[in-house]
């Protein structure tokens, strides 16, 4: 393994409900996913200076030399996915969660290791569908676009991460406008509810007739 460390911005993207969508329509889902990669996602990564490090059937790990590049790429992709994948019902929509972190990473051939990567992966899992979740380090250093509206979600205890990580969610306009898709994805996959949750949860007891 190379001991050379490099300061990078790490973007982790994961498709919501991949297994369920494959179960509903494997050929159609794969065709739509390939189309999104070819027409939108891969060109956006290249345009913003990113490099794909790893890819799975439903996930991408990408590095950027610029935090701005990583955030701009994520926002661009999340804003346009509903347009590129618009001809389907909400419960079959393809949406991604994206997590972004920055820090030292250790390259090892085609792999990348380090806390910078691990935190980005965990932030992705905390992200609502169609949104972007970033660490405090990314939030404090990003310089644009100027209209970004980050929503603080507090200190997160991420799996296998020693210290809590302060998180911020960025919801692109398309994600904010189309809540029906987010609700359908959450119901259909058993995923965690969109953040943030209300401060106080309540239970309603309703009468019924046997």
Image: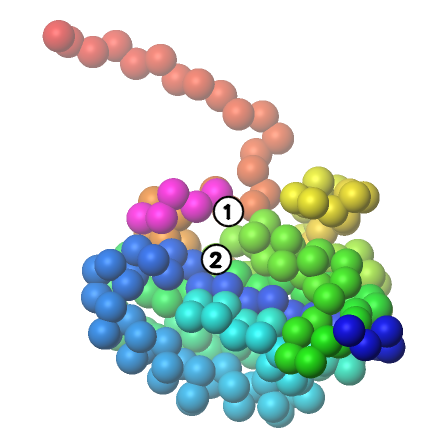
Instruction: Examine the residues drawn in magenta and state their main secondary structure.
Output: loop
Closest to the observer, 90 or 41: 41
Residue 103 or residue 111, whichever sits in front: 111
Is 202 drawn above or below residue 117 in the view shown? Answer: above
Relative side of 197 to 48, left or right: left
**Secondary structure type for disc 2:** loop
Determine the image quadrant of residue 19.
bottom left
- Residue 24's x, y, as percent? 21, 60
What residue would you read off at disc 1? 194
| Residue at the image position 39 percent from the left and 17 percent from the top | 204
Q: Residues within 10 Å of mark 1 (few under 14, many from 20)?
A: some
Spot occupied by residue 177 in the image (x, y as percentages of width and height):
45, 62
- Find numbered disc 1 in the image and state the secondary structure of the residue it sits on: loop
Report how far apart the C-alphas of labels 2 and 1 lie in the structure. 7 Å
Residue 129 shows which numbered tag? 2
Which span is picked out in magenta? 188-192
Q: Which mark is residue 127?
A: none
Q: Is residue 97 magenta?
A: no
- Quadrant placement of the C terminus: top left
């Amino acid at each position: 393994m190379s001991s050379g460390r490099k300061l990078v911005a790490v973007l982790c993207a994961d498709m919501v409900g991949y297994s369920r969508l494959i179960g509903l329509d494997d050929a159609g889902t794969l065709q739509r996913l390939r189309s999104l990669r070819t027409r939108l996602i891969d060109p956006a990564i290249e345009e913003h200076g990113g490099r794909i490090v790893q890819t799975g059937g439903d996930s991408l790990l990408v590095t950027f030399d610029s935090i701005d590049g990583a955030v701009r790429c994520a926002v661009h992709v999340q804003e346009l996915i509903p347009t590129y994948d618009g001809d389907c019902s909400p419960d079959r929509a393809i949406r991604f969660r994206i997590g972004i972190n920055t820090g030292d990473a250790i390259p090892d051939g085609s792999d990348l290791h380090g806390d910078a990567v691990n935190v980005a992966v965990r932030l992705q899992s905390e992200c609502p569908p169609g949104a972007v979740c970033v660490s405090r380090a990314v939030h404090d250093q990003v310089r644009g676009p100027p209209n970004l509206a980050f929503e603080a979600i507090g200190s997160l205890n991420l799996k296998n991460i020693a210290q809590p990580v302060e998180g911020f969610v960025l919801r692109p306009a398309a994600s904010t406008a189309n809540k029906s898709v987010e609700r359908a994805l959450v119901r259909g996959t058993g995923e965690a509810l969109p953040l943030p949750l209300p401060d106080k949860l309540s239970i309603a007891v309703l009468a019924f007739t046997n």
